[in-house]
Image (cartoon, rainbow, N blue to C red):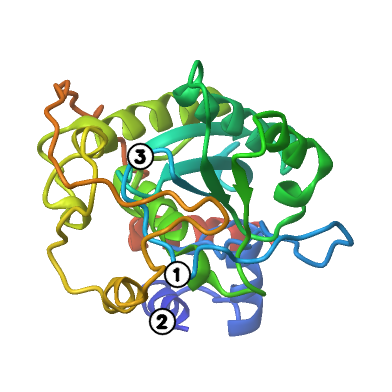
């Protein structure tokens, strides 16, 4: 243990603690540079609720409101310097435009929170005569619950309900990616002290992700999600997608499973994109080694 050797060298004239006792003191008072954090379990697919098959394996959306993917991730909220809790962020993404169209932050993994994100997403299609889209989450108990599925069914028979395969995150790659983008880019380095701070930061981050011209997306031809929402047809990507090439080679590859929507002619729309800058993010400072060693000497002396 490097810190123990540093401690013995710095306080060699005193009666120093042994290695095991030193490690116990470090763990007891939370003096490690990186505190070991437990990883909460988000997805529980061992429930006995009905699940749905993966119906988008051979499907590529050709407009907005045809395919929506969703997932839940956790965000850490620090109660003090040593203890923390988790809140859960539910996100819904339009698979064509990459736009975040539904989100909600909850204190628990109860179904009510992703269900509220689902209601927000459905506001995008309010007033349409016929809604025809596919909802594609994982097989977690919240997405398979009666409360969640009933919301989908209330919006008509044009809603296709599908789920990922058995425990394969690649079946929901877009939803997994937006989780990573939110946590490891847009909210990276931010220390949250309350749920209100999380909700405010997620609102700013989602708006920046959807609308800011300074963050174009390679998946949608260097446009913003709000700009891509005005398009129809295939949007060029800045990399080669083997999956898309394979799907497009199939005769039925560009039809929505079960609904048979044809691929419209490609045309790029124009849509105003509001400018939005992210708030300044505060990074949680780490203790220096000398300061931590001084604290350790105090704890050792105190017994």
Say if residue 120 shows up in the picture. Answer: yes
Q: Is 277 placed left or right of 191 in the picture? A: left
Q: Is 290 placed left or right of 8 in the picture? A: left
Q: Residue at x 59, y 40 (%)?
A: 158
Q: CA distance from mark 3 to mark 1?
A: 17 Å
44 lies above or below 23 = above
Q: Residue at x 42, y 32 (%)?
A: 202
101 lies above or below 126 = below
Q: Is 264 placed left or right of 198 in the picture? A: left
Q: Is 82 placed left or right of 175 in the picture? A: right
SS of the residue under disc 1: loop
Of 199 and 209, the residue lying toward us: 209
Seen as rendered, the residue at the extreme top is 127
Mark 3 and mark 2 residues within 8 Å of each other at the beta carbon? no
**Residue picked out by circle 3:** 64
**Residue picked out by circle 1:** 58
Residue 237 percent coordinates (x, y):
16, 61
SS of the residue under disc 3: loop
């Amino acid at each position: 243990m490097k810190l123990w050797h540093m401690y013995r060298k710095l306080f060699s004239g005193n009666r120093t603690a042994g290695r095991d006792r030193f490690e116990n003191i470090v763990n007891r008072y939370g003096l490690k540079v990186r505190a070991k954090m437990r990883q909460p379990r988000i997805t529980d697919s061992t429930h006995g609720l009905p699940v749905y098959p993966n119906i988008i394996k051979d499907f590529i959306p050709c407009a907005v409101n045809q395919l929506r993917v969703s997932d839940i991730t956790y965000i850490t909220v620090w109660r003090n310097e040593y203890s923390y809790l988790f809140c859960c962020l539910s996100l819904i993404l339009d698979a064509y435009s990459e736009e975040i169209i539904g989100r909600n932050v909850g204190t628990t993994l109860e179904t009510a929170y992703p269900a509220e994100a689902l209601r927000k997403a459905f506001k995008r299609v309010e007033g349409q005569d016929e809604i025809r889209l596919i909802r594609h989450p994982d097989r977690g108990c919240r997405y398979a619950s009666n409360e969640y599925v009933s919301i989908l069914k209330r919006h008509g028979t044009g809603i296709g309900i599908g789920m990922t395969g058995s425990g394969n995150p690649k079946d929901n790659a877009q939803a997994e990616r937006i989780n990573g983008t939110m946590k490891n880019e847009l909210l990276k380095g931010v220390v949250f002290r309350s749920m209100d701070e999380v909700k405010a930061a997620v609102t700013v981050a989602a708006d920046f992700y959807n609308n800011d011209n300074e963050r174009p997306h390679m998946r949608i031809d260097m446009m913003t999600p709000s700009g891509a929402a005005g398009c129809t047809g295939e949007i060029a990507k800045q990399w080669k997608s083997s999956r898309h090439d394979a799907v497009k080679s199939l005769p039925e590859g560009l039809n929505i499973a079960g609904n048979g929507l044809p691929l419209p002619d490609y045309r790029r729309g124009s849509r105003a994109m509001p400018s939005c800058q992210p708030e300044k993010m505060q990074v949680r400072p780490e203790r220096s080694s000398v300061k931590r060693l001084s604290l350790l000497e105090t704890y050792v002396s105190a017994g």
